[in-house]
Amino acid sequence: MALIQATLKTAIKAALTAQTNKTTNPEAALDDLADKLATAIDSFVKSGTVTGTCVTNTGSGTITGVVQ
């Protein structure tokens, strides 16, 4: 599957929006934001499919897989 930038954008906006009202502990809010952004980026990267060409002694072929 192709990477869908709109999905990542939505997750980033949600992570940022969740932090807008947090004023009591800025360090905890920063850690929470970093966790949410890392999760969004990780999910985005892992949502793609990788396709490549494999060349062996017996010929070549196409391989497909996912990032885990």
Image (tube, rainbow, N blue to C red):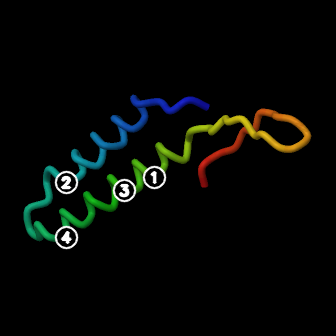
Residue ranking furthest to the front: 57
- As measured in the structure, the alpha-carbon distance from the residue carrying label 2 to the one carrying label 4 is 10 Å
Separation of disc 3 and disc 4 at Cα?
A: 15 Å
Say what amino acid the circle numbered 3 marks: Ala
Q: Residues within 10 Å of mark 1 (few under 14, many from 20)?
A: some
Instruction: Determine which residue is flagged by label 2.
Output: 19
Looking at the rendered structure, the kind of residue marked 4 is Ala
Judge from the rendering whether residue 53 lies leftward or rightward of residue 24; answer left or right.
right
Q: Quadrant of residue 34?
A: bottom left
The image quarter containing residue 31 is bottom left
Residue 7 placed where, x, y %? Answer: 43, 34
Residue behind mark 3: 38
Residue 40 at x, y percent in the picture: 40, 49
Residue type at tag 1:
Asp
Q: Which is more N-terminal, label 4 or label 2? A: 2
Distance (Cα) linking label 2 and label 3 = 15 Å
Q: Quadrant of the N terminus?
A: top right
According to the picture, the residue beneath numbered tag 1 turns out to be 42
User: Residue at the location (29% across, 49% down)?
Assistant: 15
User: Does label 1 or label 2 sit earlier along the sequence?
Assistant: 2
The mark that comes first in sequence, 2 or 3, is 2
Dots 3 and 1: beta carbons under 8 Å? yes
Q: Nearer the viewer, residue 12 or 48?
A: 48
Q: Earlier in the sequence, mark 3 or mark 4?
A: 4
Residue 28's disc number: 4
Measured Cα–Cα span from mark 1 to mark 2: 20 Å
